[in-house]
Image: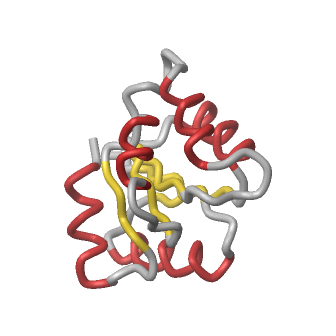
Amino acid sequence: MEKEKILIIEDNKLNRKLITSLLSLKKFCVLEAEDAETGIEIARKSMPNLILMDIQLPGMDGLAATRILKNDDHLKNIPIVAVTSYAMSGDEEKAITAGCVGYITKPIETRKFLKSIAEYIQ
């Protein structure tokens, strides 16, 4: 059986490394992108089971990228979870409206993170 693929779209190298390390503990196949444009390209090529999307990214932000992914017939069923430190009032609603199925705030609570991710894997 093929390992489930999770795409992390996160510009902060340390955050990406932490998330990758946590996901590797559960033997997920982890794909990484440091900007939205690269993330969209990887998603199209790799068809991940889940996308973890930072909201604040250089260039295109995570909400715009989510809308693009959700408007693509081949990618629209991939669950996207916003993972962000940009946690202002109303931001979770904006993420859900853009097409995210969940919202995780940073700093990541490592004990809860993997349990939360398991809820979103297809």
Q: Residue at x 47, y 55 (%)?
A: 52
Which percent across, then down, holds residue 14? 63, 82
* Above or below, 47 relative to 102: above
**Could you tell whether 6 is left or right of 122 in the image?**
right
Locate residue 115, reporting x and y percent.
Answer: 21, 69
Q: Residue at x 36, y 42 (%)?
A: 96
Q: Quadrant of residue 101 in the image?
A: top left
Q: Nearer the viewer, residue 44 or 88?
A: 88
Scheme by which the image is coloured:
secondary structure
Quadrant housing the C terminus: top left
> Which residue is the extreme one toward the top?
73
Relative to 31, does residue 98 appear above or below in the rendering? above
Q: How many marks?
A: 0
Q: Report the residue that reaches farthest toward the front.
A: 89
Identify which residue is drawn at 36% across, 77% down: 25
* Pick the front one: 31 or 107: 107
